[in-house]
Image (cartoon, rainbow, N blue to C red):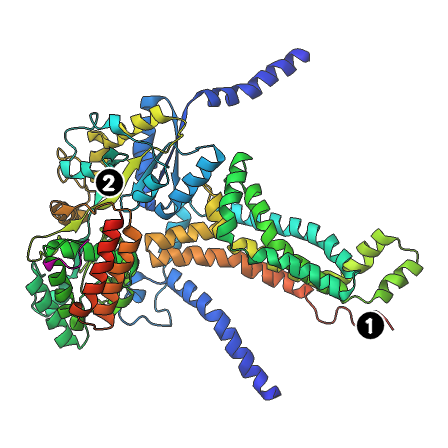
Amino acid sequence: MRSLRVPFLLVMVLFAAAPLYGLLKISLSPPGEVMTAHPTLVPHGITWRHWQRVIESGQIGAPLRKSLLVASGTTALALLLAGPAAYSLVQLPLRWRYGVLIGLFLCRMLPEVSVAMPIAVVFLRWGLMDTALGLTLAHLPMALPVAAWVLTTAFGNIPRDVEEAAALDGCNLWRTLAYVIIPLALPGVIVAALLVWLLSWEEFVLATYLTLGDKTMPLQVYYYLYQGNAFVTAVAAVIMTVPVLLLSALLQRFIRETSLAGVVR
Amino acid sequence: MRWLLVVLGILAVLPTWAAAEEPALTVTMRLAEAEWEVMRRDILPTFEILCACKVRAIDVPPEALVQRLRAMQQAGRMDIDLFAQDNMRLQELVDAGLVSPLTAQESEMSDSVYPALRVAGVIDKQRYFVPFRPNVQIAYYNADKFTEYDLQPPRTWPELLAVARAFAERDGIGRVLFKGAGGAPTTTQLYEWIVAGGGDPFDFADSGTVATFEFLASLRPYLSPESRRAKWDTTNDALAQDAAFLAQNWPFGVPLLVKDYGKTAIRTYSGWAGPARQAHVIGGDVLGIPVGARNRRLALAMIQFLQSHMVQEALTERLGWPSLRSDIGDSTSEAWMRPHAESVQEALSHGVFRANVGYWADYERLANEAVQRILWRAEAPATVLPPLAARLDALRKRE
């Protein structure tokens, strides 16, 4: 079984990396190399022309900024709201805990298209149309159940003995949370943050309804797709992928299986 | 000190007040990057100077316009003053009560606007829209391949069949594309083929319509396999990747294929005629004013401006757009664009408007079903069409 591990991992890596490679290759290829009956897998020439065109158009900076703002804002708010909720849920019996969580997920069963119009109407009245704050608030109902689920699991994995030991050492609830629980639950918090950030980063339907002029990155990529130029679409898609890769690389060192090993005897 | 605070306070408020005093017009369109550049650099600033106002131009795709207008109407806050919309998507705006009549503008429209184009904005005997940017599908062909196989671009249906057969026999695979993936691309192409065949697109029992489907069935063995997934965007890919040597599409593919992709062997011409005539569905954008628009007066001025000789000439010259005015010739400034602009202008002279019917969505389903069954399941038109004709007849009668 162990001998299959490496080939399996290799296949998985290839599976994940192939679309990214395809995008990057198209974004850097001269048109003649891709727009032919037999495009090659390996690049034979490299051009920065498509990148130059996208960057010089000045149409990528604002969507990138808005998407970063919305995704980061949604993540911060979701963690801030779901964190205490998850910690409270952990105190409940298992049956109740998952009952509440499933209840939260039921909200997600409604298709976004069906709620997008009422949200757009209300946000228009409140002057939140076309704003990063409006989109952040609209993304929250989608992000909260995910964050609550992951954080409940993360907090639930921490043995109660740890909290009791902290109390015996004189920590009050807030100090226990700040110095014991949250550091121990950090991998879960990071996973929750990553998931929520990604959900918000790639969200399209709500963004379509709540945007008039200031596009987000998915809308900008769609704009290029609509124009039909495969090369500039690939460039925009690569630009959209970069923050995801950076964030994942940056945060994955916090995600450790063994963070709870040895905390209780 | 108090003095200074008062002065600073006034200075802080003044720009806001001044900005609030200057009227602002919000216009939505769906344009390509290069088109937006011309619009924002050359066209809109002139209007701002003429009308002493600010113009906020926003890119809104045609499929999203209805939902946005609907949300604004429900919120009681119409933030859009004027929109340019695909003329294939007008009925839904009228049905939803989102667009206000422009009857008074009928008399103000310049006499130079092609009479054929004026028809587009009239629905249920009421004018809701005015022409802005006419468009038609043209035929794209790979000149190198036609030369290599010693063929001429077809001008009639028999020639089209012969060319399709010649490519299929030599390459062992079809090279003529019909947009058969379904949806609007298929319906639009079918519509103009039926008109070219002398049929009534809304009557599948009509002899001309039946003849068109029979011609399509005879073409089936020689069509490019890419036809199954061909829409407006994938048609460009098929031409660029030499999967098809002949296809009809909108002119947006010209700069993409020739300029961006460097496919200089791709040429265009107006296309082929059926037994009755040559026919091209007139697409493109028309202008409309939403119900509840806050700056209707400015929006009307903008309509006049966009239809003016000066603006239409600039758009033709800088972007190669076909003009809605008869007093503007082919003034495309870029030499490589000229033959393509001529193809469009020629096709436009054979333009037909697609009728706006309330049952269009159902009609599209029926038309797509007919194409799917005849082309991809190889069913005989004589079997497929009669039941579909009865369903279509029922739709017509219901309306």
Q: Which residues are magenta?
A: B202-207
Residue A88 shown left or right of residue A251 in the figure: right
* Residue topped by disc 2: B133
- At 14% from the left and 59% from the top, the residue drawn is B209
Q: Residue furthest top?
A: B3
Residue A117 shown left or right of residue B114 in the figure: right
Residue B129, percent from left and from top: 27, 35
The N terminus of chain B lies in which quarter of the figure?
Answer: top right
* Residue topped by disc 1: A262
- Magenta: main secondary structure equals loop
Q: Viewer-proximal residue, B50 or A203?
A: A203
In the image, residue B71 sits, relative to residue B304, either above or below, namely below
Q: Which of the 4 image quarters holds residue B147?
A: bottom left
The kind of residue tagged 2 is Arg
The numbered mark 2 sits on a residue in which chain?
A: B
- Badges 1 and 2, same chain: no
